[in-house]
Amino acid sequence: MTDEGQKDQTLAEDEVTLKRLGYAQELARRMSGFSNFAISLSIICILAGGITSFQVGFCTVGGASIGLGWPIVCLFSLMVALTMGQVASAFPTAGGLYHWASILGGKGWGWITAWFNLAGLVTVLAAINAGTYDFIVGAFQLPVEKNPVAWKAAGVSVITLSQAVFNHRGIRVTTLLTDFSGWLILVVSLLLTVVLAGKSAALDFSRLITFANYSGLPAESPVFPKTENMAWLFALGALLPAYTITGFDASAHTSEETIGAARNVPRGIVRSVLVSSLFGWIMLAAIVLAIPDMDAAARQGGNVFYWIMREVLSPRLAGAFFVGIAIAQYLCGLATLTSASRMTYAFARDGGLPFSRGLRSVSAAHQTPAIAIWTVSITAILFMIFIPYTTIAAVCAVFLYISYVLPTAIGFFAHGRTWKTMGPWQIGRWYRPLAALSVIFCGFLIVIGMQPPNEQAVVIVGGAVALLSVAWFAGVRTRFQGPPPTIMLNSIAPGGAASDSTNVRNM
């Protein structure tokens, strides 16, 4: 069979699988396996979260937060990705986590998961674009002191709305940009690592395991309040990798646009986390090794990365890296908007959102969920205006990991019982122990994500839980029907073929 014939057969199988899951093929299915991997890699983007939140890790216990803390947290993120991949292979739809929770636990769990995931995606878009704006201002020392709030609102609006234009134009344009973004992230991070390592006066690897108390710095606006509890500071530093290694659910949200989704989606999820974790660790370690004075760097607070670059590199070379990083951060936001709009479309398609009729509409000209794209963009802009960047980063990490872990936790109880037929990609007997560890990690992240100076996260996350509970029991549980009743636990057999079905259980 020719490559074109194989592709046509795979597309036909994808369409049949989607139909058995209760949906017609409305979105353009043009993404390759690499493109599916690239969109998650672009959203994780170690040049975005890893750079703009570098101070969140470094200004806790110094180099040990990078050398030891980063790989520990990334290991837990990989566990989440592995369990997520197994479920994604079994149920490859644009609803992703929302559909998985509905299938495995009932429509109520699906509804809760959808709202947490959607809130996480909107807030992470706000965090990425706010961070991109801050990076551009800090890196290029733009004069915005006279009216910083207005400048930031305008800057983030331009960034976000331009990303919406690209997304509106179609998945082909978005795919080209995210494919380029994937390569750009790898190339820039590798070059930055090599250059900084070469500029280091002495490769003092002991820095990466040395603990120093940098809480309370800088004195005028500390990254974290002063404390003598080093173990607690080390735990707070976990927010850097936890925030950075998010967004890998994008591979799931673009399932209905990916060729060979049952195999390529879980591969995209796991590979994006693996590559980002490894490259991010090496790059951040090189940054720490290149620091001329650790204590002086900690006193820079949020400006620490710019200070390091200017101290170590020539203005021209530092400027070139700043340009590459800024482009990667912009494309990170663009890919995040793609993911968030697909989640909005999928949830609205099942009537889960206010104004669902409009949000689920697909542009006939571009085959994209146009209204969902613009709605997510505007919502993210509004959220950014009222919430500080570090709090947005903490909140989005909490929201996203709750949504990641809910289907995993439900799958823990369903695995081998009501959920017996897996997709073509699976981790077998490792699923349940890794699912349990993922839930424990999520609980830890919720606790540290709400500590000062991010105590506003308690109000946001707590308010969201309270509001969802009231809405559900006040009437949503009777009005919301959930995914189509043709979505079944055993709807996909190994190899991607469909099998017999039974009705979805309600919560």
Image (cartoon, rainbow, N blue to C red):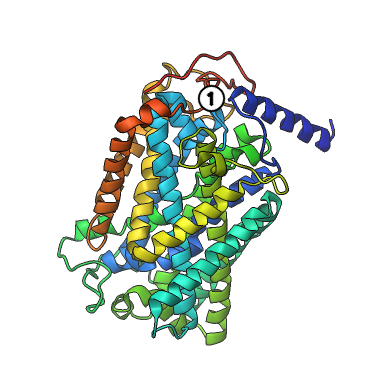
- Quadrant in the rendering for residue 31: top right
What's the residue at 34%, 54% (across, down)?
A: 395
Q: Is residue 90 above or below residue 244?
A: above
Q: Is residue 202 visible?
A: no
In the displayed orientation, state which residue is furthest to the right: 2
**Image coordinates for residue 478, horizontal then vertical, percent:** 38, 25
* 354 relative to 165 in the view: left or right: left
Tell me: 98 left or right of 478. right
Where is mark 1, residue-wise? 484
Residue 500 placement: quadrant: top right
Left-right relation of 376 to 234:
right
Q: In front: 477, or 186?
A: 477
Look at the numbered disc 1 and give the secondary structure of its residue: loop
From the viewer's side, name the closer residue of 347 and 453. Answer: 347
Q: Quadrant of the N terminus?
A: top right
Q: Residue at x 58, y 68 (%)?
A: 327
Query: Around disc 1, counting alpha carbons within 10 Å, would you say few (fewer than 14), some (14 to 19), or many (20 or more)?
Result: some
* Residue 303: x %, y % from top left: 38, 77
Judge left or right: residue 442 versus residue 171: left
The answer to whether one can see residue 443 in this image is: yes
Q: Amino acid at mark 1?
A: Pro
Q: Residue at x 41, y 55 (%)?
A: 123
Viewer-side residue, 369 vs 241 = 369
Rendering coords of residue 391 (x, y %) = 32, 60
The residue under the point 56% across, 31% down is 89
Quarter of the C terminus within the rendering: top left
Above or below — where is 344 with respect to 220? above
Q: Nearer the viewer, residue 250 or 24?
A: 24
**Residue 495 placed where, x, y %?**
63, 24
Q: Is residue 111 above or below residue 21?
A: below
Q: Is residue 51 above or below residue 44?
A: below
